[in-house]
Amino acid sequence: MAFSDAQAADIRRFCGYPAYGAGAAGFQGWRFFTAYGLLEFRINNLSPEEESVVTNYLATLYQLEDAVPDAGSRLETAQASVWTRNPAELRERMALFDNWRRRLCGFLGLPPGPALGDGSVRLVV
């Protein structure tokens, strides 16, 4: 069982790597980034058992991703009856979502992509 093109695109996206495009053309892509090449290799060469694990990660990540914009519908409510909005909900949902994205990267054995980072702050001088 191979991943569909949509699943492969979502794996790249969740791992923080840029869009692959129509193929390996031009100056960007896996040929210029070792980790991206490793990601493409893993996407195309996982065992069926490993693909099942990644599919489970995708199912969880889809739910977490959908919950982030949903939290935006409650941002304007500070209190309604006995319900009080968690002011940190959006930040906490994003942190949970990014944590699961990093877990997927860890399972695939590659560093988080440029759009995800490694979760730390670096000072470059």
Image (cartoon, rainbow, N blue to C red):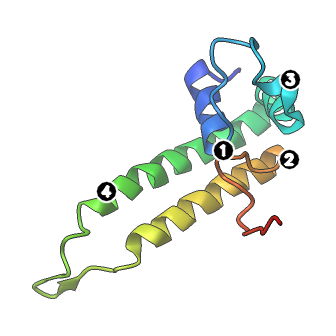
- Comparing labels 3 and 1, the label whose residue is closer to the camera: 3
Split into 4 quadrants, where in the image is the C terminus?
A: bottom right
- Comparing labels 1 and 4, the label whose residue is closer to the camera: 1
- Comparing labels 1 and 2, the label whose residue is closer to the camera: 1
* Residue to which mark 2 is pinned: 109
**Other residues around mark 3 within 10 Å, as few (<14) / some (14–19) / many (≥20):** few
Split into 4 quadrants, where in the image is the N terminus?
A: top right
Label located before the other in sequence (4 or 2): 4
Q: Position of residue 33 (x, y in %)?
A: 85, 33
* Residue to which mark 4 is pinned: 70
Q: Secondary structure at mark 3?
A: helix
Q: CA distance from mark 1 to mark 4?
A: 22 Å
Label located before the other in sequence (3 or 1): 1
Q: CA distance from mark 3 to mark 4?
A: 37 Å
**Other residues around mark 1 within 10 Å, as few (<14) / some (14–19) / many (≥20):** many
Label located before the other in sequence (3 or 4): 3
Q: Position of residue 34 (x, y in %)?
A: 89, 35
- Comparing labels 3 and 2, the label whose residue is closer to the camera: 3
Q: Is residue 14 above or below residue 82?
A: above
Kind of residue indicated by mark 4: Asp
Q: In this orientation, which residue lies closer to the viewer: 11 or 112?
A: 112
Kind of residue indicated by mark 3: Arg
- Give the farthest residue toward the bottom: 82
Residue shown at 19% from the left, 83% from the top: 83
